[in-house]
Structures are given as C-alpha cells and as structure tokens.
Image: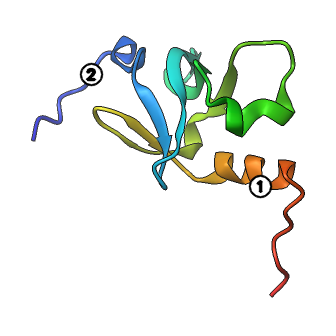
C-alpha cells in the first residue's frame, strides 16, 4: 500500500459518501488552515438534494468539517451525521433511552 503524501488537489472531484453508503456530494475545493498547513474542511457541490433540501440557502454547496472524514480512497467516507440532517428535517426525533 502506497502511503506517500498526496497533493491536496487530488481530493477535488472525489465523491463523498456517508459511512452508511449514502451519497453526500462531490468535493469542489478544500478549506485550509495556512498557519498549520492542515485541511480543516471540504467544500462540496453536486449535493444530494434529499439530504440538504430543508437547509437550502440559495447556494449550491456546503462546507463540511474535515473532522467528519473517516476514510479517503477512491471516494471519501464521512460520519453519518449528514444523514441525521435528513432525519431532523422530516420531524423524526431520536428516542430517549
């Protein structure tokens, strides 16, 4: 397995899925902290309209925190938190345990 560093631009164009396999969007850009030289967010476009329809702001993308990223390969996997957006939109409440 090649673990050599990759250029940040190699992320652009990759599809983003939740760890449950739901398409979230496509990476259009990355957000960097130039002082620490660390990626701290991913700018997504071509969004899954079902996930973000209630959060429509008239814009065509969102920035998700890089801390949500679980794995980077041919696609990028993120925590299922974005799917919870859809659940709260539909009025579903998590059952109290």
Q: Quadrant of the rendered structure where residue 14 is? A: top left
Mark 2 → mark 1, Cα distance in angstroms? 35 Å
The colour scheme is: rainbow
19 in relation to 49, above or below:
below
Identify the secondary structure beneath mark 1: helix
Left/right of residue 34 with respect to residue 94 in the rendered view:
left
Quarter placement of the C terminus: bottom right
User: In the depicted view, which residue is nearer to us: 91 or 2?
Assistant: 91
Residue 25, picture quadrant: top right
Circle 1 packing at 10 Å, graded few (<14), some (14-19), many (20+), is: some
For image coordinates 48% across by 40% down, the residue present is: 17
User: In the image, 85: left or right of 38?
Assistant: right
**22 lies left or right of 15:** right
Which residue bears the numbered disc 1? Answer: 87
* Residue 76 at x, y percent in the picture: 41, 36
- Which label sits on residue 72? none
Q: Is residue 42 above or below residue 22?
A: above
Residue 27 horizontal/vertical position (percent): 50, 20
Residue at horizontal 77 percent and vertical 55 percent from the top: 87
> Residue at 68% of width from left, 29% of height from top?
49
Q: Which residue is nearer to you in this view: 67 or 34?
A: 67
Q: Which residue is mark 2?
A: 6
Q: Nearer the viewer, residue 39 or 12?
A: 12
Quick one: label 2 or label 1, which is nearer the N terminus?
2
The percent position of residue 22, horizontal first and vertical second, equals 52, 45
């Amino acid at each position: 397995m090649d673990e050599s560093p990759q250029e940040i631009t190699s992320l652009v164009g990759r599809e983003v899925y939740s760890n449950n396999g739901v398409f979230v969007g496509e990476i259009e850009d990355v957000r960097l902290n130039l002082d620490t030289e660390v990626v701290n967010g991913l700018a997504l476009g071509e969004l899954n309209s079902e996930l973000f329809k209630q959060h429509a702001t008239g814009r065509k993308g969102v920035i998700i925190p890089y801390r949500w990223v679980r794995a980077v390969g041919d696609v990028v996997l993120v925590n299922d938190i974005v799917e919870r957006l859809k659940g709260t939109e539909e009025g579903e409440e998590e059952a109290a345990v």
